[in-house]
Amino acid sequence: MLDFNRPPYVGKELDYIKEAVDLHKICGDGKFTQLCSEWMKKRFEINNVLLTTSCTHALEMAAILCDIQKGDEVIMPSYTFVSTADAFVLRGAKIVFVDIRPDTMNIDETKIEAAITDKTKVIVPVHYAGVSCEMDTIMAIAKKHHLLVVEDAAQGVTAYYKGKALGTIGDFGCYSFHETKNYSMGEGGAILFHDDQYKEKAEISREKGTNRSKFFRGQVDKYTWVDYGSSYLPSDLNAAYLWAQLEAADMINNHRLSTWHKYYDGLSKLAEAGYIELPYVPSECTHNAHMFYIKTKDLTDRSALIQHLKKKGIQAVFHYVPLHSSPAGQKFGYFHGVDEYTTKESERLLRLPLFYNITDDEISSVIEAIKEYYR
C-alpha cells in the first residue's frame, strides 16, 4: 500500500533525541526548543516565536492574546480544520463563516467586509495547501475596521506571500509540526508575532499561567501563578526531532516541490482534456508543496476514483467537511452569505500521496492509476 503520508525523517532525529536525554533536559524550553525558535525567528524575520504542543494550542494562545470575550465574533472560512474555530469558541466567541475562492480554496477576501459587525474582533485567514490568502486586502480590511488578524498557517511553513513568510503578516501566526506536515515533531506547533507587547502574556499563558519563564531568565527570584493559562509547552524531545527537520528544511522543501511538479506535469493532459482540475498558485505566492490535490467532476466521480486507487494499493483522501454543516458549526456559528463554493468545491477535492522521500516510481504509479481510471 502506498500511504497517503509518511512522517519526514532525515537521519539525525534519534541522535538529537539522545542528546536531549544525555543533557538531562527533556521538558520544555531546553536546547532544542531554543534552536528551533531561533531558527524560525531568523528565517522568517519575526520577533517572537514560541513552540507549542500543537497548532491547536498555538491558535488557543492567539485567542487569549486577542482577548476574545463571550459574544465576540470571529470571521473565518468554513473549509478548515476544526481547531481553527475551536480555539475561539473556547473563549466564548461566535464563528462567522464566509465562502471560499474556488481557485485556491482560501477565504474569499471579497466576502469578508460584508460579514463584519460591531461584535467582530478577529479575521482568521487559513492558508490552504501552503498557498497564501490575499493578505494585502485582508490586512487593509482589518486596519479599516480595527480588527486583529490571526493567520492559520498550519500548512504554510516556508511558504510566502510577496516575499513575506506566511504566519508573519498578521498580528499572530500559527504553525503546525504534526506528522502530516512538511516539518514534523510528531505533535507540535508554534505561535509567531512581531509586537513585543504580547511577549510576557504569551509566556505566561504557555506556562500554565505562571511567570516561570521570567524565573528561568533570573528576572524574578521565584515564580508564581499570575494569570490564566495552560500547558502549551512541548517536550524538548519533540523539539529535538524537529531540529533535524529544520536543519534540512531546504532539502525537504526542494524534494516536495519536485514531487508536486511531477504530479502537475504528469496529470496536465487530463486537466487539458477537462477530466480534472489542477491546483492554482497565484503569481504573488510562493508555495511549499504541502499537498497536491486534484478536483474531480463531482462527489460521485471522486468516490469512484478513491476506490479505484485503493484497489491499486494507493491511499488518496478527501479533506475537510465544511464546518458550518457540522452540529458544532451550527451551534457555535453561522454562514454569512451564500455557500456558493465551499461545499461544492470541497466535495470535488482529492489529495494525492505526497511526503518527503516518496520515490519517482511511486509518483508514476499514482499518475498511471489516475490515467487508467479516466481511460
Image (tube, grey):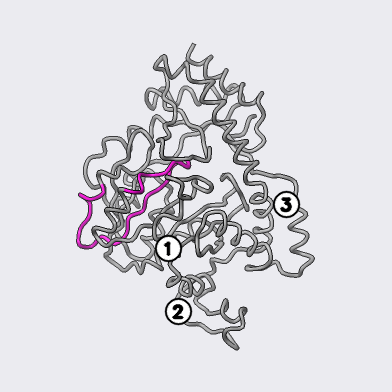
Residue for point 67% across, 46% down: 248
Q: Label 2's element?
A: loop
Q: Label 3's element?
A: helix
Left or right: residue 11 compared with residue 165: right
CB of mark 2 within 8 Å of CB of mark 1? no
Please tell me how crowded label 2 is: few (under 14), some (14-19), or many (20+) other residues with Cα within 10 Å. Answer: few
Give the amino acid type for the residue marked by disc 1 in the picture.
Ala
| Residue with the mark numbered 3 | 13
Q: Label 1's element?
A: helix
| Residue with the mark numbered 2 | 227
Q: Nearer the viewer, mark 3 or mark 2?
A: 3
Q: CA distance from mark 2 to mark 1?
A: 15 Å
Question: If the image is split into quadrants, where does the N terminus sit?
Answer: top right
Q: Position of residue 261 (x, y in %)?
A: 54, 28
- Label ID, residue 3: none
- Point out the stretch of residues depicted in magenta: 112-136
Q: CA distance from mark 3 to mark 1?
A: 29 Å
The residue furthest bottom is 221
Residue for point 24% across, 59% down: 145
Left or right: residue 203 compared with residue 142: right
Give the amino acid type for the residue marked by disc 2 in the picture.
Asp
Name the image quarter holding residue 367: top right
Who comes first in sequence, dot 2 or dot 1?
Answer: 1
Please tell me how crowded label 3 is: few (under 14), some (14-19), or many (20+) other residues with Cα within 10 Å. Answer: many
Where 143 sits versus 12, above or below?
below
Give the amino acid type for the residue marked by disc 3 in the picture.
Glu
